[in-house]
Amino acid sequence: MRMIIKGKNIDVSDPVREYAERKMRRLERFLDDRTEAVVEFSTEQHRSSTDSQIVEVTLVVDGQPLRSHAAGPTHQASLDTVIDRIERQAVDFREKPKGRARLEAGKSKRIVEEGGPISSEKGSAPETVEDRARPSSIVKTKRFAIEPMFEEDAVARMEELGHHFFIFVNAETERLCVVYKRDRGDYGMIEPMIAGQYTPGRNGHNAG
């Protein structure tokens, strides 16, 4: 496993770097020499002292990125948490090849739905201009149970599932919320409000 340990706008001390190298060796039994691992440390001053030290781990396994992050009072504590999470992802990835096939199929479906290259299946007609001109309609409805959780747990769950967004009930506000991953790698949260009942969130502005 090829490993990169770095800091985001901070210097990683030797004790923290050595601790990271030792903890990351836990993953070697699931991975091989082709796997790339990036451990990034950062500090967010606006957070409370109990969750200001951030660690994000990214594994690239067979070309598939697995990511997770955690926040804690120290970088070592955050690393302990994120290693547990990324280890579960690595185990699932290695033990469920069918799940990977479904994931790749889902990616292909998204490419088609977003207007990417379209390849006709055997026995099916290619898409025509008339097909694309047809109005969109809802063809499937999914229902699932939502359990109350805190924002950090929702982000962790989203990362474990490999999704770009996750719907949950905020345990603090008891409101339906959506966390999502932004293009620059950090996270955002949407708190839907009924029109006319809007009140500014903790940042005082809409999620961007």
Image (cartoon, helix red, strand yellow):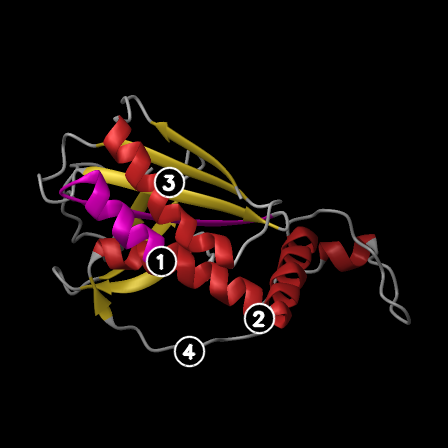
Image: 173 above or below 143: above
Residue 64 visible to the viewer: yes
Foreground label between 4 and 3: 3
Q: How far is disc 4 from disc 1 in space, using C-alphas? A: 26 Å
Q: Position of residue 103 (x, y in %)?
A: 60, 62
The secondary structure type at the circle numbered 3 is helix
Q: Give the range drawn in magenta.
A: 64-84
Q: How far is disc 4 from disc 3 in space, using C-alphas? A: 42 Å
Q: Which of marks 4 and 1 is nearer the N terminus?
A: 1
Q: Position of residue 6 (x, y in %)?
A: 37, 28
Q: How far is disc 2 from disc 4 in space, using C-alphas? A: 24 Å
Q: What residue type is labelled 4?
A: Arg
State the residue position of label 3.
21
Q: Where is residue 104 in the image (x, y as percent from the top left)?
A: 65, 59
Quarter holding the C terminus? top left
State the residue position of label 1.
85
Quick check: marks 4 and 1 in contact, CB under 8 Å?
Answer: no
The secondary structure type at the circle numbered 1 is helix
Q: Is residue 202 left or right of residue 127?
A: left
State the residue position of label 2.
96
State the residue lying farthest toward the right. 123
Q: How crowded is mark 3: few (under 14 residues within 10 Å), some or many (20 or more)?
A: some
